[in-house]
Image (tube, grey):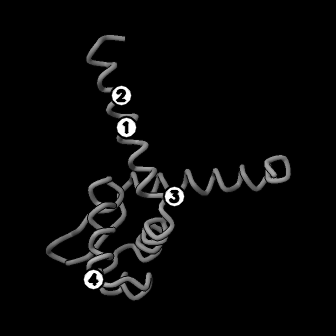
Amino acid sequence: MSRVEKILDTMARKKTLELCRIGCDKTNYKILKLVKYKKEIKVPILMKECKLTVMPANKRVNDLRRAGLIERIKNKRVIVITPLGNQLIKTVKKMEGMVFDNLVEML
C-alpha cells in the first residue's frame, strides 16, 4: 500500500467512525429514522416529533449534515436522508438482528 493510500485509508476510517458516532447517538438515530420514514421533513416538524427546541434541533441537523447522513434542500426548506444515512440505518438494523440472535451468549 502506497503512502497516499495509507493516508486515504486512515482518513476514511476516521470519517467512518465519526459518522457512526454521530449517527448512532440515540436522538440523532431517531432523527435519521424519522427523515427516512417521511422521505423529507421540515425542521419544525422534526422538533415537535423529537421534542427538541430550535438550537438543539439545528445543532443535530447540522452534525448529521456534516457527517453526510442527511442533506438540506434549501429551496424547499426540508431535510432528506442521503444514501449514507440509509446505509447506516440498514447496518444498525442488521447488527440489531445479530445481537438479538446472540443475546443470551452476550449476557
Instruction: Tell me if mark 2 has few (under 14), some (14-19) or many (20+) residues whose alpha carbon lies within 10 angstroms of its own.
Output: few
Q: Secondary structure at mark 1?
A: helix
Query: Residue at coordinates 29% horizontally, 71% vertically from top-left?
Result: 79
Q: N-terminal of the two: label 3 or label 1?
A: 1
Spatial CA span between label 2 and label 4? 35 Å
Identify the residue shown where x is 39% and y is 50%. 19
Residue drawn at x 26%, y 64% is 62
Q: Position of residue 22 (x, y in %)?
A: 41, 56
Mark identifier at residue 10: 2
Q: Which residue is mark 3?
A: 89
Residue mark closest to the camera, 2 vs 3: 2
Which residue is tagged 4?
A: 54
Viewer-nearest residue: 42 or 17: 17
Dot 4 lies on which element? helix
The N terminus sits in image quarter: top left
Relative to 6, 32 lies left or right: right
Confirm or deny contact between disc 2 and disc 1 (CB under 8 A): yes
Q: Is residue 67 above or below residue 52?
A: above
Q: CA distance from mark 4 to mark 1?
A: 29 Å
Instruction: Tell me where residue 28 sits by quadrant.
Output: bottom left
